[in-house]
Image (cartoon, grey):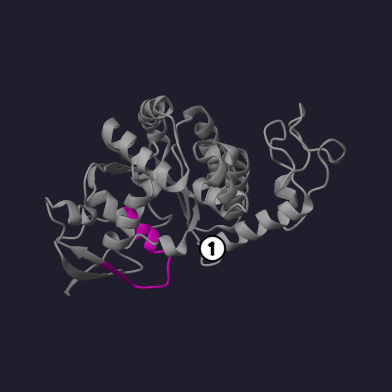
Amino acid sequence: RGGRETSAASQYSTELHGEVYGPFAEIRKDLDYAWHPNYTRQRQAWQDGLIRGLLANAVPKEHPWVVFTCGAMGAGKGHVMNWLSRHADFPLEHMVCIDPDKFKIAMPEWHGYVEHNLEDAGTMCHRESGLLQELAQEVALRSGCHTWIDGSLSDHRWYSEVFSDLRARFPRYRIAILHVHCTPDTVYERAERRGRETGRFVPEDLLRRSIAETRESMRLLGPLADFVAEVENESDPPWITISEERPRACARPGAAEQPLPAWFPSSACGKCIALQGPLLDFVTKVNSQLEAPWIKVRCCGKKQKKQLARTAVREQLVGG
């Protein structure tokens, strides 16, 4: 999978870094080559195929969202997103889902690394999975699709620049952060179990630092987003402890601010907390970009339907 090594020059040069190929060649030229190596033509073609597959079910939207999950490995970010998909109809199947860990598992070398050096397998794929994330993110944003970026969001300085770049180059996009957290002991236990199952090990000291860094990132990056949610994932179901939107930035352009429907509950159990206030409003806004006029949710074990009005918040519950 190799190619030329990284160089002291971060800006792309054919002489220093070799040729780039394929449909994403221009994006590859903008990568930081002081960090990323260039890859062989065959490997670039494999990477391109992986990225194209991510966009297979995604459709460009007029007012797309980019959703960043934030939290340490073992916090259960993927579990929470799948839970939202099942219980609040969060449209994962219509989003570009970018998960660096899944890139690692897809690599042809992965099983060999796991077989011969289980604890270091993830580290050995880390740099290429980071390149794939950067490429996939840029391709998704240029296409105007809803995008979910599954990561820790621990480097708040880097992501503050990412957010600024998003606002400048992709002003149609709105930014959401879902911070998924649980107790440190639960993080360590889950990370150890997942490492044994998948080969993606993370040292405990790194996990401890990640827990603190993601908490700090949420404090600093939250005000830069259009929507934020705190999700406690200590047990099943997850519990949404805080959800907040900034109406000026979050509302669909040209749409008047509307009151919440009369049927909104003042309190709810864990499984129907997704029906409440800003979180439902956020999911509704994302789904309003899709063709299907219905959202199906499960509240307290009962199926319910809500019909989405396209021009106003005129929603009805229909018994399920």
Q: Which residues are magenta?
A: 282-296
Give the residue pinned by disc 1.
60
Q: Quadrant of residue 283?
A: bottom left
Q: Is residue 191 above or below residue 97?
A: above
Q: Which image quarter holds the C terminus?
A: bottom left
Q: Nearer the viewer, residue 47 or 289?
A: 47
Q: Nearer the viewer, residue 82 or 246?
A: 82
Residue 16: x percent and y percent?
84, 35
Residue 131: x percent and y percent?
63, 43
Q: Quadrant of residue 73?
A: top left
Q: Is residue 294 above or below residue 233?
A: below
Residue 31: x percent and y percent?
69, 40
Q: Residue furthest front?
A: 116
Q: Is residue 101 above or below residue 64?
A: above
Q: Residue furthest right?
A: 15
Q: Nearer the viewer, residue 10 or 161?
A: 10
Is residue 207 left or right of 45 when viewed as pictured? left
Amino acid on which disc 1 is placed: Pro
Q: Residues within 10 Å of mark 1 (few under 14, many from 20)?
A: some
Would residue 108 be seen by someone viewing this image from the given angle? yes
Residue 224: x percent and y percent?
43, 36
**Label 1's element?**
loop
- Whether residue 181 appears in magenta in the rendering, the answer is no
- Whether residue 293 appears in magenta in the rendering, the answer is yes
Residue lying at 40% horizontally and 27% vertically, measured from the top left: 213
Would residue 226 be seen by someone viewing this image from the given angle? no
Residue lying at 68% horizontally and 37% vertically, measured from the top left: 36
Q: Nearer the viewer, residue 16 or 157?
A: 16
Is residue 280 left or right of 159 when viewed as pictured? left
